[in-house]
Image: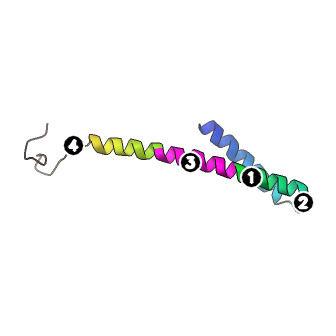
Amino acid sequence: MMDLFESKMKRLEEIVERLEEREIPLGESLSLFEEGVALVRELDGILQGAEGKIRMLMEDLRLKELPWDETGKGDEGDEIR
């Protein structure tokens, strides 16, 4: 997944560099802009997918945590070992 993200990001950077040039024909500019917008949408989807996975993993960690207080006893007063 990261290779895909990285390659799309690199292509987007190339597009931005080309669009920043002063002597670029209008047709090429529009074509590159359209490609750039599509890449931004794809990259956003990849990032949102990664964010969702991170949230699931963090929630899983929270569910596995044991209740604990400074006395070494859980919420029910039972000692946690």
Real-space Cα separation, disc 2 to disc 1, in angstroms: 15 Å
Q: Position of residue 54 (x, y in %)?
A: 45, 44
The disc, 1 or 3, on the residue closer to the chain's N-terminal end is: 1
Q: Which disc, if any, is residue 36?
A: 1
The disc, 4 or 1, on the residue closer to the chain's N-terminal end is: 1
Real-space Cα separation, disc 4 to disc 2, in angstroms: 62 Å
The disc, 3 or 2, on the residue closer to the chain's N-terminal end is: 2
Q: Inspect the image, locate mark 1, and give the three-letter code of the amino acid beneath it.
A: Gly
Identify the image quadrant of residue 57. Answer: top left
Report whether 81 appears left or right of 61: left
Real-space Cα separation, disc 3 to disc 2, in angstroms: 31 Å
Q: Which disc, if any, is residue 66?
A: 4
Q: Secondary structure at mark 4?
A: loop
Q: Is residue 26 visible?
A: yes
Residue position marked by numbered label 3 in the rendering: 47
Identify the image quadrant of residue 21. Answer: bottom right
Q: Secondary structure at mark 2?
A: helix
- Identify the residue at horizontal 59%, vertical 36% (top origin): 1
Q: Secondary structure at mark 1?
A: helix
Q: Inspect the image, locate mark 2, and give the three-letter code of the amino acid beneath it.
A: Leu
The disc, 4 or 3, on the residue closer to the chain's N-terminal end is: 3
Q: Position of residue 61 (x, y in %)?
A: 33, 42
Real-space Cα separation, disc 1 to disc 3, in angstroms: 16 Å
CB contact under 8 Å: marks 2 and 1: no
The stretch in magenta equals: 39-52
Q: Secondary structure at mark 3?
A: helix
